[in-house]
Image (cartoon, helix red, strand yellow):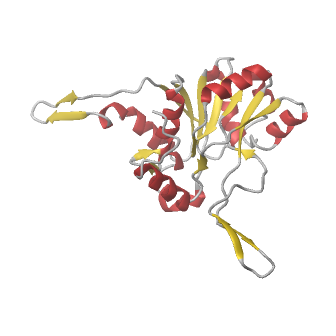
Amino acid sequence: MKVVILAGGFGTRLSEETEIKPKPMIEIGGKPILWHIMKIYSHYGYNEFIICLGYKGYVIKEYFANYYRHHSDITIDFSTNTTQIHNSHAEPWKVTLIDTGQDTFTGGRVKRIKAYTEGNPFMLTYGDGVGEVNINELVNFHQKNKKHLTVTAVQPSGRFGALNTNSQNEVNAFIEKPKGDGSWINGGFFVCQPEVFDYIEGDATIFEREPMEKLAKDNQMMAFKHHGFWRPMDTLRDKNELNDLWLKGEAKWKNW
C-alpha cells in the first residue's frame, strides 16, 4: 500500500521559515518533518510514497534528488571532477514527487495523484504532523470495517494549563496542557479505498469539507481512535516544542 503525503500548502502561520522553504521541509532535530513522517511509515514496512507538491515544491524535489549524497560522506576530487561516496546509507524508499499545483486545495491534490495509486487502496496524511500511531493497527481496523475511508481521530492537548478552583478561588488542582474538551478531531493518518476519488470534484475541493462530509453521510467513514501522542506543527511554538522533545530524547513518534 502506497503512502500519499500532502506537502503543497503555504504554511502561512509559520511564515518565519516558510518564506524560504515549504512547511514539510522545516526541520525537527536537523531533519525535515517530512522525513520524520516517512520514517514512521517505513518502520511498519510501508516504503512507497507519493508526495503532493505545491508551494516551493522544487525544494522537496532537490532534497530527495540529492538525498543519497546528503546522507553520506563524500570526497570530491576537483582535479579529475570525480566524487567518491563513503559510509553511504540509503532508505528503502521509492518516492514519487508530483506537482499538484500551487493553489490546489487538499482534495484536488489527492485527485491529481489518482493514476499513481493504480486503483489500489492507499494511505494519506499531512506533511506537518507526527504521532505514535500504530500503522499496522490502523490498516487492520480499516480492512476489518470495510468502509471507503478511515481517519485517525485524536484528542489534542490544550494550549494552556487548566485550573480547578473552589468558591473561595483556591486552586484545588492544576493540570498542565490537559486534553481538549473531550471531542475527537481529524489527526490525518487516513486509509482510503479507491472510491474516495469519486467524492472529489477538482482542484477547488477541500478534502476535509465536501468529500469527508459526504462520506460520513453515506456511512462510509470510520474513526480509528488514537489515544497516544500526536502533534501538528502549525506554529513556531509547535515547531520549537517538537524540536525540544527530539533533543531531550522524548520524541514519542520516533519508532525507528
Residue at the location (80% across, 27% down)? 198
Report the front residue among 133 and 187. 133
Taking the image as shown, residue 193 lies to the left or right of residue 11, namely right
Residue at the location (64% across, 66% down)? 161
> Compared to 163, does 67 lie above or below?
above
Report the front residue among 256 and 162. 162
Image quarter where the C terminus lies is: top left
Q: Which residue lies furthest to the top in this view?
A: 119
> Compared to 157, does 161 lie above or below?
below
Image quarter where the N terminus lies is: top right
Q: Residue furthest left?
A: 79
Residue at the location (13% across, 36% down)? 78
- Horizontal and vertical percent position of residue 149: 76, 29
- Horizontal and vertical percent position of residue 105: 69, 44
- Horizontal and vertical percent position of residue 238: 55, 57
Taking the image as shown, residue 49 lies to the left or right of residue 227, namely left
Report the front residue among 215 and 100. 215
Q: Quadrant of residue 225?
A: top right
> Compared to 155, does 191 lie above or below?
above
Q: Can residue 168 be seen in this view?
A: yes
> Compared to 22, does 92 lie above or below?
above
- Horizontal and vertical percent position of residue 95: 49, 27
Report the front residue among 240 and 18. 240
Q: Can residue 9 be seen in this view?
A: no
Taking the image as shown, residue 113 lies to the left or right of residue 250, namely right
Q: How many marks?
A: 0
